[in-house]
Structure formats: C-alpha cells, structure tokens
Image (tube, rainbow, N blue to C red):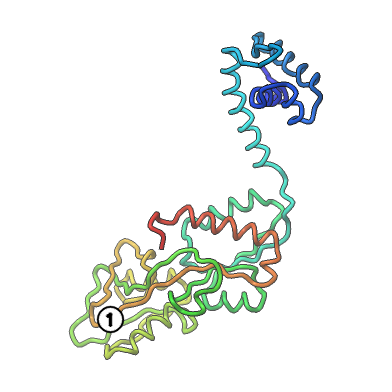
Amino acid sequence: MDVDPTLLRAFVAVSEAGGFTRAARRLHLSQSAVSHQIRRLEAQLGRSLIFRTTRQLTLTEDGEDLLTHAREILAGLDALTRRFRPSAVAGVVRFGVPETFMGTRLPALLCQFSRAYPAVRLDVQVSSYLDLSTMIAAEELDLAVVLFVAGDRDGETGTFLRRTHFVWAVAETFALAEGHSLPLAFHPPHCLNRQVGVAALEATDLDWHIAFTSPSEHGLRAAVQSGLAAAVLMRDDLEPGMRRIDGHYGLPPLPDADFRLIWSRDGRRSPAARAFGEMLTGMEAAEAPATGR
C-alpha cells in the first residue's frame, strides 16, 4: 500500500490543530480541500480515522495508531529531503591542518563535508603550525588549525578546539648510558614542538644533542620507536611502544598547548569556509570529554 505523504501531512495537521479550519490555515489550503484529503486517506486505508461532531474532533483508535506512524514517516521524509537537497553554498575552501590534528577523524570530516556541500571544492594543505599561521596572514588559506602554547597572548586568537600537553617521549626499550649526551629528534627549527623543547632544555644543565631531524611526523615517530632518540610529542600522539619520560634524565616539564581554529579575512567572508568551520568545531565538540579542557 502506497500512502500519499500529502494526505498524511494533512492528517497530522488536523490532529495537532484540533480541527479542519486551523489545519487549513497551517497548510495554506481551504477547509474543504483538507476535508477532502482526510476522506481520501480514510478511503485508501479502509478505516475511519476521526470522530467528527459540531463541537469537537477526536481520533479513533485507528487514528491514534496512524498518528504515531505518520509522524515517524514524515520526520524520515523531511530528513531525507534535507540530506539530498542541493546546497546553495559553492566555491573553494582552503583549509590548513597539521599532521597531528584529528588523526582518523580528518578523513571522516572531509568526506562528510563533501557529501553535504557537493558544489564546494576543498583545497587542503598539511604543514607545520607556524607555516599555517604565516599562510593565514598572507591570505593563502581561509582557515587553519594551529597549535599555540597555552597562556601565550597569541594563543587567545581564533576558536578554541581542545587542549593537549607536550611530553617527552622515547621507545619502551630506550636506555641512556650514564654520562652520555641525550639524543633528541626534532622537526626543523620553524616547528613549535622544537621551539618548546629547546627553550625548556636551555634552562637546564642537561647535556643533549640533536640526532635526528625530519619535517614529517611519521619520521619523528620512527626515530622514537627505533630507540634512536627522545622527542617532544603531543600527549595524545603517543603510540604503543612509546613511554613518557617527563622528569627523567633531568628533562624539564613542558607546557600545555591549545589547538585553535584561525581565519583569514577572506575566509570569514566565505559562506563555504564558514560552513566548513562550523562542521569542524561541531565534530570536535562531539568528541570532547565531558570534563571540558
């Protein structure tokens, strides 16, 4: 049996409005048109749905059952329409993101946005935090996720996404012979992790040296996993086979850090970029722990 959703919508309107006149106003139809739709629905189902009197309108038992199903069907049809309605948002979104952000959630975000806004082309740049900030300032990106040391004045810009913490990390099997210099693995000098680590080390008397340099996060993790060197990583990026050594070997404590979403001037004016930013922040909020920061 194929039931016309238009008839179901008329039936729900009559039930909720409590009468044909008010339902007709809600549906922008005449009262006679609404009455005709209800008669058609009753004929199609072969059941009486409404008790009509001069003073009130009540649903039959079949009408009560139908009301529940009709609401579910109409809600599903409305959701289907919203999902596949062509979006008026179009253009290009230039998005910058570091390797360490979102992990497996980033592909899901890109896929979800592409489905929701098929007329928008994504241009994604993966780079270091400081490079991304420079690209935003130069209007080369619309929006980017950037890491700031918590408490820094610059770190108050943009939209807060989540807080993490810098840690010293080594392989589970790492051991430093007594009296030996501590080998370290770093990104190139323009990386925030390196700047944070070096600044902390320079305030100590620890003997250390750089044994490995890589622009890639995977390269840095490989150096750690091999037992070659220690590195500054995000707490959330520790992998099986790694351990924290904060406070060991004379290593100083490291600060908290905030992931923030920053915008260029052009990005804030772009409906497509704003839609992408809203989806990104919504996904982050959904994944955030109940305790907040």
**Residue 114, percent from left and from top:** 63, 52
Mark 1 burial class by Cα count in 10 Å: few <14, some 14-19, many 20+: some
Residue 170's image quarter? bottom left
Q: What element carries label 1?
A: loop
- Residue 149 vs residue 50, the one in the foreground: 50
Residue plotted at (59% across, 50% down): 112
Residue plotted at (48% across, 72% down): 147
Residue plotted at (34% across, 81% down): 184
Residue 64's image quarter? top right
Left or right: 209 as drawn, with respect to 39: left
Q: Where's the N terminus, which quadrant? A: top right
Looking at the image, how many numbered discs can be counted on the residues? 1
Left or right: 33 as drawn, with respect to 222: right
Tell me which amino acid carries mark 1: Leu
**Residue 214, percent from left and from top:** 44, 77
Residue plotted at (52% across, 71% down): 146
Residue 245's image quarter? bottom left
Residue of label 1: 251
**Residue 107, percent from left and from top:** 53, 55
Q: Where's the C terminus, which quadrant? A: bottom left
**Residue 257, percent from left and from top:** 42, 72
Using the image, determine if residue 120 lies above or below residue 234. Answer: above
- Residue 36 vs residue 130, the one in the foreground: 36
Q: Residue furthest left?
A: 178
Using the image, determine if residue 83 lies above or below residue 275. Answer: above
Using the image, determine if residue 212 lies above or below residue 280. Answer: below
- Residue 215 vs residue 152, the one in the foreground: 152
Q: Residue furthest front?
A: 55
